[in-house]
């Protein structure tokens, strides 16, 4: 009951989608192959979103994966090397949200995040998919049972109410067929919405709009004949499973059309043709949108609204406030000079910017548990540096992966949102004989 109430509150708090504008499209810019960058292109203004979100790109997809909420606020992504950890950027503050206990799988894939901060992912393209609530810091019971179910390819609706998946097993997915079938799970009631299965065709790669009223998949254009294979098309339905025909020309004859993506309103439909060409279709005007050449849109591209973080003291309301009604301190660019190091004097240093003076606490955690804390008074507005040797007091931290969570309190008692960074302490060097 408590989980259902939390999910309900998140859904009600999610912003409604009503903007009649062309979407922002994400992509990985590979101009510099050694330093790819996650960029956002605003099709409405035909310009890049600058600066791009501060997401470190560890290689290229499929090794590096990301998801973005349809309102543009949250970006979830993985790092490298394995085991890969998940991170959630909140563009309201450009800081990472702590995600204790989320790193269950060594290689999480098919990342999706809702406007309310729910995160869904699977185990390297296999089940079971997991749902994590970033606001409570806990995994959520999605109702997909048994625990070894073979659902995969999770995709959340923008409001976090529905979870789309596909499942391969007739014995573990309540489906009459043994081929991949599409599902829609209601996360509030933790129940299957009974989206009808197609017994003759494999269904893959689900997509949903903001409130889950539209659901898309790709599957063969018609039942597969015994003589061989057939190219895939995009199919669109309402949540009850009623087929919504797409005009001729959306799906290209005799080539693969796959990997659908919807904007929050459901007006814009993205798809990939022959694994190469990303296309954007305007369902209202029944036309393809002219996309710029040279942008590396691909099967991982997502559609969102533009997002402008609240500015303290700026027009339109100055960002989060504390109990005194004053703005909370804002942490900017929390980072380490070295994220992999051995315990020694001056091994590394925490660096960050502050919107105002205050005192800070850096809580060091490992496997979700607190192992120590660093406190500093008299932090300045602007740039700050705190040296870190890898010791908490006189105690050396043992080799392994840790998370550091920074919280700053200003002179009025207002606390910042937490900022998080992960680091790894290396074992001692072995001398060569």
Image (cartoon, helix red, strand yellow):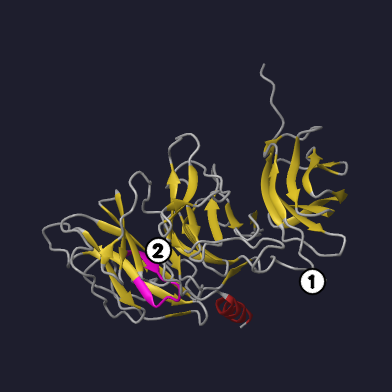
**Is 187 in front, or is 199?**
187
**Image coords of residue 387 (percent x, y):** 80, 39
- Vertical placement of residue 81 versus 162, above or below: above
**Along the line of sight, the residue nearer the viewer: 65 or 176:** 65
Circle 1 residue: 325
Residue 64 in the image, given as x and y percentages of width and height = 48, 47
Q: Secondary structure at mark 1?
A: loop
Q: In the figure, is residue 185 to the left or right of 408? A: left
Report the residue that reaches farthest toward the top.
Answer: 433
Q: Position of residue 165 (x, y in %)?
A: 40, 68
Number of numbered tags placed on the structure image: 2
Quarter of the picture containing the C terminus is top right
Determine whether, in the image, residue 433 is placed left or right of residue 326: left
Task: Kindly identify which residue carries mark 2.
Answer: 22
Q: Which quarter of the picture shows residue 96? A: bottom right
Chain part drawn in magenta: 203-215
* Disc 2 from disc 1: Cα separation: 36 Å
Residue ID at (70%, 55%): 419
Q: Nearer the viewer, residue 111 or 327?
A: 327
First along the sequence among labels 2 and 1: 2
């Amino acid at each position: 009951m408590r989980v259902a109430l939390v999910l309900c509150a998140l859904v009600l708090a999610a912003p409604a989608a009503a903007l009649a504008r062309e979407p922002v499209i994400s992509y990985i810019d590979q101009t510099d192959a050694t330093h790819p960058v996650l960029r956002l292109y605003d099709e409405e203004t035909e310009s890049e979103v600058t600066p791009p979100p501060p997401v470190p790109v560890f290689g290229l997809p499929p090794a590096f994966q990301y998801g973005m909420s349809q309102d543009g606020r949250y970006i979830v992504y993985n790092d490298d090397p394995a085991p890969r950890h998940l991170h959630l950027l909140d563009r309201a503050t450009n800081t990472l949200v702590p995600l204790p206990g989320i790193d269950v799988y060594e290689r999480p894939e098919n990342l999706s995040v809702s406007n309310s901060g729910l995160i869904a992912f699977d185990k390297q393209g296999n089940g079971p998919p997991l749902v994590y609530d970033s606001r409570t810091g806990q995994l959520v019971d999605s109702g997909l049972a048994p625990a070894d179910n073979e659902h995969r390819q999770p995709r959340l609706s923008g409001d976090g109410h529905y979870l789309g998946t596909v499942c391969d097993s007739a014995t573990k997915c309540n489906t009459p067929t043994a081929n991949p079938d599409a599902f829609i799970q209601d996360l509030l009631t933790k129940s299957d919405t009974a989206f009808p299965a197609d017994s003759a065709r494999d269904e893959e790669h689900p997509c949903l709009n903001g409130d889950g009223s539209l659901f898309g998949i790709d599957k063969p254009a018609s039942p597969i004949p015994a003589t061989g294979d057939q190219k895939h098309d995009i199919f669109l339905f309402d949540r009850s499973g009623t087929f919504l025909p797409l005009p001729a020309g959306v799906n290209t004859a005799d080539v693969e059309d796959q990997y659908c993506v919807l904007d929050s309103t459901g007006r814009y439909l993205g798809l990939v043709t022959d694994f190469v060409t990303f296309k954007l279709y305007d369902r209202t005007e029944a036309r393809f949108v002219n996309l710029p050449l040279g942008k590396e849109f691909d099967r991982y591209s997502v559609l969102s609204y533009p997002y402008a973080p609240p500015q303290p003291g700026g027009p339109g309301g100055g960002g989060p406030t504390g109990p005194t009604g004053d703005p909370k301190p804002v942490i900017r660019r929390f980072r380490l000079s070295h994220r992999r190091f051995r315990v020694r004097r001056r091994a590394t240093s925490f660096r960050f910017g502050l919107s105002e003076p205050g005192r800070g606490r850096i809580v060091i955690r490992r496997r979700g548990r607190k192992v120590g804390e660093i406190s500093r008074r008299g932090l300045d507005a602007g740039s700050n540096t705190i040296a870190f040797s890898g010791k908490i007091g006189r105690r050396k931290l043992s080799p392994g992966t840790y998370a550091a969570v920074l919280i700053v309190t200003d002179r009025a008692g207002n606390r910042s949102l937490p900022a998080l960074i992960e680091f790894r302490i290396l074992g001692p060097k072995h001398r060569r004989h």
